[in-house]
Image: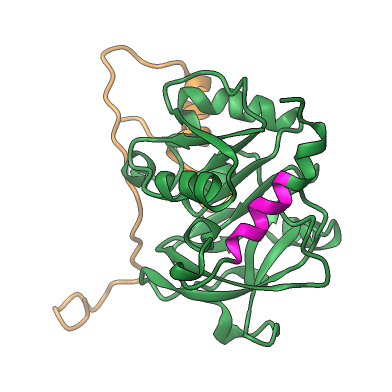
Amino acid sequence: LKDLGLGTVDSVRVGKLMELEFKTAPDGSKLEEVCRDLLSNPVIEDYTIRFS
Amino acid sequence: MKIAVVQFPGSNCDQDCLRALTDGLHIQAAYLWHKQTSVSGFDAVVLPGGFSYGDYLRCGAIARFAPIMRDVIRAANEGMPVIGICNGFQILCEAGLLPGALIRNQSLHFVCQPVWLRVETCETVFTANLEGRRILRMPVAHGEGSYFADQSTLAKLESNNQVVFRYVDEYGKVTPESNPNGSLHNIAGICNQARNVVGMMPHPDRAWDHKLGSDDGKLLFGSLVETLEPFVSR
């Protein structure tokens, strides 16, 4: 990155981003459950849920 | 006695497992399709290697929710012997039947090679005949076989004697060079606390005849048969 002229970069993170679309807002605890049990493995991964 | 070999879409060692049992050990075995919902009629379950559901998301993450797994988990919790080999081990960890997880090999490469294993405990139905820290030869073939667990889980596994197999050199010594994937503590296989569920990355199903380079894999299934036979009324 620095060689390409982005000398001011402080950190880089590569990770998984999963985008789920809903017509109606999902139940928050169900969403947590799905993130914990399927979309991530808490033994080796962390997750954050963001709405936009 | 009759042993179930579960087939998920993407399993590719199902036939090896079945042949190891039927041709190698002359015991009854049959496939159980992932959409089936019961293991009744079987005395033990094998989760074979492969790439269940394409290994999408994480290895074993989707297979864990297959219809058959609900009953496999129930049966395992009631004491039925269950062995997960390679992808099967990953599925058992994802299902929470075994602690920890299997992550990308340290080398980042798929490894496919014969390894030496030391049997660390004969207190499982799959290793009951293998006293005296026997050294076994069989192949590994995986991209995500590096065993990981947090320090407290690891300490618990060690103190409960739940590490079943460790990667060693041909003299039985634990060395970094003999570890093909960067597994913590050179762990190649573990069991649950009740000792009826075993997961291992190496393939006993690919080592049940001298023509395959080794028949050490027969010893594991042989242990299972000898341990279970007296209790099976069929």
Q: Position of residue B130 (x, y in %)?
A: 77, 63
Name the side, left or right, on which B193 lies relative to B217. right
Q: How many marks?
A: 0
Which chain is drawn using orange? A
Q: Position of residue B67 (x, y in %)?
A: 47, 22
Q: Position of residue B112 (x, y in %)?
A: 40, 71
In magenta stretch: residue B222: yes
Q: Quadrant of the N terminus of chain B?
A: top right
First to last magenta residue range:
B216-225
Query: Which residue extends farthest right?
Result: B159
Q: Nearer the viewer, residue B124 or B18?
A: B18
| Residue drawn at x 46%, y 16% as measured from the top left | A27
Q: Chain B: give its colour.
A: green
Q: Quadrant of the C terminus of chain B?
A: top right
| Residue drawn at x 73%, y 30% as measured from the top left | B77
Please say whether residue B36 is visible from this viewpoint: yes
Please say whether residue A46 is visible from this viewpoint: no
Name the side, left or right, on which A43 lies relative to B16. right
When the figure is inspected, residue B163 is found, relative to residue B90, above or below; the finding is: below
Name the side, left or right, on which B193 lies relative to B225. right
Q: Position of residue B226 (x, y in %)?
A: 76, 47
